[in-house]
Image (cartoon, grey):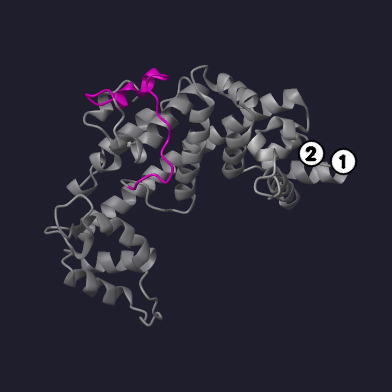
């Protein structure tokens, strides 16, 4: 491990940063436009968008990026990329909100039929969630404590009304209103096989418990990127989704000539998008959300450095039935 050193760099203004970018080879045709955007967006936020325009050290697969920019790279292209990614995040946020609410509703239907407080019952979960491991407390204890704390802190009127009128914990159909995507994803990872299978059947009979847990974890990362305004396009997924064309026909568009799903398609944004399209169609059969997404991508300017292939999109992706 390299020895850590004190941070001693001083603040640089947008104008000074602009000079540095020019020195590294980034073409800036409108300096006023560039300085204005550096000032209101910030150097480090924009740096995520000019990163793909930097040179590689060599042509090897794992080559490092250099500080210098590729010949012909322009600040205007960086801003086009930034604005496209913003539009993309806004479009994905719409679907992610609807998917989160619908999955939560299905979970409430399944757990509510078992009992009002089934989400607190150890019998609702797998053994690894309710048993001690290496002498450590069961995972269920801090998880339920976290759900209770979220309910107590909630500013929602239904939560305030319940606490003012009833003693004890809320039933699942009330408590779930204060659960975020992270809570849902974590719970779906540890619910009993019987409960997870019931939720899957309610969404689509072909959906398996492994796939659902994987998808929720993957889409939680996408949602967090949207919420924190982080770059989404052409970045590797933190948790890639489980994609099985043998189980779900709609995913056959991902298969290569060898009958496999290439990592390039499943481990970048495209893999998450096909999952979102599938779930949107499960919950909203007449949706045209994916049509609007396709138009957004196809009608946007994509320099070679950030074209759809870099985000895991296969050739002729827009002709696949799922779109």
Q: Residue at x 18, y 58 (%)?
A: 56
Q: Where is residue 208 in the image (x, y as percent from the top left)?
A: 51, 24
Residue range in magenta is 235-259
Where is the N terminus found, in terms of image quarters? Answer: bottom left
In-image side of 262 versus 69 (left or right)? right
Q: Is residue 284 visible?
A: no
Indicate whether 14 appears above or below 307: below
Considering the whole magenta stretch, tell me its main secondary structure.
Answer: loop
| Location of residue 243 by image quarter | top left
Q: Is residue 124 magenta?
A: no
Tell whether label 1 touches label 2 (CB within 8 Å): yes
Q: Can residue 120 be seen in this view?
A: yes
Residue 136, label in figure: none
In-image side of 55 versus 230 (left or right)? left
The answer to which of 176 and 164 lies nearer the viewer is: 176
Q: Where is residue 231 in the image (x, y as percent from the top left)?
A: 37, 51
The residue that label 1 is drawn on is: 166
Q: Position of residue 44 (x, y in %)?
A: 36, 65
The residue that label 2 is drawn on is: 170
């Amino acid at each position: 491990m390299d020895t850590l050193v004190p941070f001693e760099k001083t603040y640089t203004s947008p104008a000074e940063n602009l000079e540095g970018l020019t020195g590294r080879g980034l073409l800036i045709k409108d300096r006023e436009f560039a300085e204005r955007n550096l000032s209101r967006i910030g150097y480090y936020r924009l740096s995520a968008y000019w990163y793909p325009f930097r040179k590689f050290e060599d042509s090897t697969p794992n080559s490092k990026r250099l500080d210098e920019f590729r010949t012909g790279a322009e600040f205007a292209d960086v801003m086009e990329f930034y604005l496209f990614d913003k539009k993309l995040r806004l479009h994905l946020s719409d679907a992610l909100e609807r998917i989160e609410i619908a999955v939560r509703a299905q979970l409430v239907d399944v757990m509510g039929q078992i009992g009002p407080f089934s989400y607190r019952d150890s019998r609702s979960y797998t053994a690894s969630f309710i048993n001690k491991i290496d002498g450590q407390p069961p995972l269920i204890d801090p998880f339920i404590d976290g759900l209770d704390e979220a309910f107590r802190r909630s500013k929602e009127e239904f939560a305030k009304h319940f606490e003012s009128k009833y003693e004890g914990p809320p039933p699942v159909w009330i408590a779930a209103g204060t659960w975020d995507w992270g809570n849902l994803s974590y719970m779906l990872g540890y619910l009993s096989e019987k409960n997870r299978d019931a939720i899957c059947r309610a969404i689509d009979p072909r959906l398996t418990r492994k796939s659902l847990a994987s998808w929720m974890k993957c889409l939680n990362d996408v949602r967090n990127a949207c919420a924190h305004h982080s770059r989404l396009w052409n970045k590797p997924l933190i948790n890639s989704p489980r994609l099985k064309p043998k189980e779900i026909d709609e995913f056959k568009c991902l298969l290569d000539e060898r009958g496999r799903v290439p990592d390039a398609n499943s481990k970048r944004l495209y893999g998450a998008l096909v999952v979102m399209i599938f779930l949107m169609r499960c919950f909203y059969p007449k949706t045209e959300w994916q049509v609007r997404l396709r138009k957004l991508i196809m009608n946007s300017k994509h320099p070679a450095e950030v074209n759809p292939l870099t985000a895991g999109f296969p050739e002729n992706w827009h002709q696949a039935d799922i779109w």
